[in-house]
Amino acid sequence: MLVTRASYDWAFADDIPGSRCDPEDGPWPRAYRVLDDASLWRELSALAKPQSKLFDPARGFKADSLNFQPCPRTRTQDRYVVRQLNVHGRTWTFTGVFDGHLGDVTVEHVSHHLPIIVREFLEGHFEPNSEQKFTPEAISDLFTNAISAFDDAIAQDVLGLFGGSMEGVARYSDSEIRQIINDQHAGGANWRKARLCMYGTTALVALVDPDHTSLWLAQLGDCQATLVTFDEKTNTWNTDVLTREQNGDNDAEIARVQKEHPGEAECVVDRRVLGALAPFRCLGDIPFKQPPEFSRRILYNLLPGFHDTGPWEEFLVRNKSPPYISAIPEITYRRLAPRALGSIAPPRYLILSSDGFADLCNGTSQAHVITAWARKMESIPPMSPVDPAIKSNNMALRLLREALGGDDHCSVSRVLTLDMESAWIDDTSIVVQTL
């Protein structure tokens, strides 16, 4: 962290947003530094490392992004993506946030490769040098197929080492399996494929067409997309949540899994899939999508080995008819009114955020936080340059600060400078793009 001149104060566990700070993990209270405004912006920027990308300066299209975890000793398992996809000379916009779990191997793979896969599917759909039109339904299907195919390949790349099926795996001894998948001495290609199967990630990705008249969202898990627009008749900012959580808090997701696995009382236990996983739709998480022998024969033989397979066996014994976790995204489509060159109309914002953002709001309605942020953004021209020292004009960074407490220096400072040995809030990724 940056060293700044500041006064000190004391925080209790209940003062920290989210559920990472446990009153039992004392001693409480703990010290934190109260930062002045300039120091606060610098510290926030240093921790969140905000980025900006211009898409179309003439029409005010850009995206700001960040990945925030104030504990410097903890590697965040969140990722974000802000890309432009060149498809036969036309530029599509691809943005997304990903919340990894169990480790960061799969989320790193997904955030890097998924935009490439979507671009390849788009290239296959459109003919070069043509004025081919599309329907929203066609792109929705393409988006779904690209994501599902990408997820299928994670397990199939490993099964392909053994003839392409679990029946093929059964013909190999444990010793032979270990020799095949632990090929670190030869570059580790098979080892890396197998490792991807051990972890998972949620995903929320947005696709905007070259004319900026159509928006598609693909949702797997519990990240959130919010469309923010200005109503000139009422002079107010409106927020429209475009996604729904696909986790144990959603009774419809629980009912879906139970319907897909009739007679299996333990397909959902304590609102978790097989009693283990909170999100009900993810990329990766292959132990929940393949028979138990995939984990026991392949992943248990991966080196370095498992010191304790007990936690895995607790949910593998419930695995009777996989898959239990779905990689079929929910697609949301929105038609966007065209934005003329030089338009002076208020910007439209699309906010993509991992579930850590909701934790940071700490009981305050996310809609309230976002509308307060949007009102403050009115004083900043959409294409104003970002301050290179503190990046306080970055849309995502300003939204992060608003969630942490806005102008309340003590509230923001508590999260930034708390004296703790491990992470005290959930990882948080935010992408804010203008549409």
Image: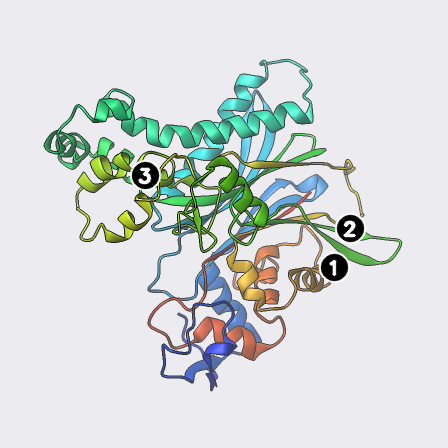
Whole-number angstrom distance, CA of label 3 to CA of label 1: 44 Å
Q: Is residue 278 left or right of residue 315?
A: right
| Badge 1 element | loop
Residue 426 is situated, as x and y percent measured from the top left of the image, at: 45, 61
**Which one is earlier in the sequence, the residue at label 2 or at label 1?**
2
User: In front here: 18 or 57?
Assistant: 18
- What residue is shown at x 44% (from left), y 80% (from top)? 32
Quarter of the rendering containing residue 190: top left
**Which one is earlier in the sequence, the residue at label 3 or at label 2?**
3
Q: Quadrant of the C terminus?
A: top right
Quarter of the rendering containing residue 270: bottom left
Q: Amino acid at mark 3?
A: Leu
Asked if marks 2 and 1 touch (Cβ < 8 Å), the reply is yes
Q: Tell me the tag on residue 346.
A: 2
Residue 333 is situated, as x and y percent measured from the top left of the image, at: 67, 35
| Badge 3 element | helix
Q: Which residue is mark 3?
A: 196
